[in-house]
Image (cartoon, rainbow, N blue to C red):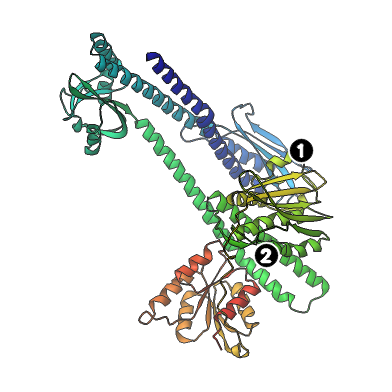
Amino acid sequence: MATVFLVLMLTLATLGALDWLLVLEPRLRSEAQTTARALAHAEARSLQPLIGSRSHQPKIQMIRDAVSEMLILTDANTERPFFSAISIEFAPPWVSASFAMGDDSCTDCFANEIPLFDPNSGDLMAILRIKSSPVFYQAMRDDMRASFLIWTAGLLALMSLGWWALSLFQTHSDESDVRAAAIFNTSPIPLLLISRPHGTIIDTNGAATHLFDAVPLSYSRISDLLDRHSFEQLLLVEPGTRLAFETELHLTGRDLPVKATATALTLDGRELLVVGLIDITEEKAFEKRLAAEKEKADAASRAKSTFLATMSHEIRTPLNGILGFTQVLANGDLSRDQREHLELIDLSARNLLGVIEEVLDFSRIEAGKFSVRESSVDLPLLLDDTVRLFRAKAESKGLELVYREATELPATINTDGLRLRQLLGILVDNAIKFTPRGGLEVEVEIRESEQEPLLIFKVIDTGIGIAESELPKLFEPFYQVDQTSRRPFGGTGLGLVIARNIAESLGGTIAVTSEEGHGSCFTVSLPLLISDQPATLPSPLSKRRVSASTTNNRALVVDDDPINGKLLVYLLQARNVIAERVESGSMALRQIEHATYDMVFLDLHMPGLTGWDVLEELQKRQLNGKRNYPPLIATTADVQKDSRERLLADGMDDFLAKPVEAGALDEIIERWSPVT
């Protein structure tokens, strides 16, 4: 039996060591490397304004000073530097300005290579190489390793003690009594021998004496040390069983957190408990530090999401003016050159809008808020709409867009139609972007597999292709193949990351095959979930047709931004709506009280009274709970996925996103014009 027990202990020790080497320590190092990479990227952004451009000499001395300050940054706890070495290698024509600082001999450091670009042209100006010290990793590793070793040793010791104690009380031999007493007294684990049912402490060992700083009085009660719940748990332990739990010992002047293990046995007709105690003060302190670090990380993530939402609003607001007045100018008499310039302005603004949407989607992925909503979807209609959407773009580049589908495609499937359309749109748009000549094909088929049938989407192009060595990195965030031939195509490097996340969220996979100079093939495999329900269509709008007599419709535009307010007034007047604008929520309340309007376009983000404040005040002014104010259409640049639902739930009647689309504005006017 002793041999079996020894083998069991060795097995547990081996499993514990393997768990540390293969799971815990690599995970700690990976987390530390991620933290070091984030810190390196944050410091790189501080150097960006100093790198100059192709036409201006980099500010070398200022860069050196900034690098010197980075090298002296240290961890507050260990006083070790965050970075060991930093070098900058400038691209032509400033190669001679390259330099390196710090100690490059660190073998355990995390190396990060960060490209710095010309802010004007987007050309590569320099490569910043930062060696980050593993200071984050080592402190956490040492703490966790010590805790792990103590736990392992304690567990093995408790198992050993329990076996020997049980053997002692079962055999009733003098030799076993002596051995058990020796184990009890010399065990490194604090032990208490307790008589039931009253919980009287019969004996303690030397380790318990050291733990308590004084030997408990003989025949004192365990209930004096434990809370009522823990004491009741001990009394319920049956002979031959073991109970493990965490509690606190109420000592003189302090509460000591411990992990307790209780084993019940019967000796000479007496019911006894052997209780082992392990001081977990350090473990609790470590858990608190981890919780604090997690809270800091969560706060940073929330701050980043808030920042991105704010920046999205701040960028989309002026974009609304740019796109809106570009459309207004395009309706006038323009020369050919002027119209071409306006089209370029409109294209650039919409490209910027696409970049903002990609960054927001990536932010949702990082925050774990990227979700899918399954419903019954008309698959042929979705595919046809997606291909038609991109056919004009392909033809404008002289490319042929071919669509092929299997004849056995089901009419309806269960999936998230919006996300599937977004996924296919990213792949088709990429194919058009990176195909200078030739064309692309979109193929859809059903493939049988061992588990379930799969729905296969392929996007094949004749574009510039991707080198085989670059394929494993293709789905990494912000990664773009570093080839001169690809730089003119631009992009954030987030599209394929979002595409992969959508595919995995829908239960599928995405793969790519490519040959440099001979095009690429992206393949999406999704489980085929055929639906027997009719396809879910958008809820039909309340059809309030605008008749010829609706020229007296009146609208109030509430917007503190003069450009966006003027634009919306102009667009409404162009649609035979009498519109006027006020600049604040307080002015809006006065106008609504003294004039009659068919609809109010209410900006949500205004100084003073916000759009929500105006809504709340109008709701308070209702007569006997009866609404006495016109329909409120929220106008905002916040276009996150749940924005519309949240606004409608708060009491808004409709939602108009910025930049304002002509079709969306037409629908709102039609929806809220009085029925005639």
**Nearer to us in this view, 474 or 533:** 533
Secondary element under disc 2, as helix, strand or loop, is helix
Seen at 37% across and 31% down, the residue is 282
Earlier residue among tags 2 and 1: 1
- Which residue position is annotated with label 1? 96
Q: Position of residue 586 (x, y in %)?
A: 46, 76
User: In this image, 449 relative to 297: left or right?
Assistant: right
Give the residue type that dot 2 points to.
Leu
| Quarter containing the C terminus | bottom right
Q: Position of residue 577 (x, y in %)?
A: 60, 84
Between marks 2 and 1 in the image, the one whose residue lies nearer the viewer: 2
Question: In the rendered view, would you say 50 is above or below 412?
Answer: above
Question: In the rendered view, would you say 14 is above or below 587?
Answer: above
The furthest residue to the bottom = 549
Label of residue 381 in the image: 2
User: In this image, 140 relative to 249: left or right?
Assistant: right
Give the residue type that dot 1 points to.
Ser
* Quadrant position of residue 176: top left
Mark 1 neighbour class, 10 Å CA radius: few under 14, some 14 to 19, many 20 or more: few
Q: Position of residue 112 (x, y in %)?
A: 64, 37
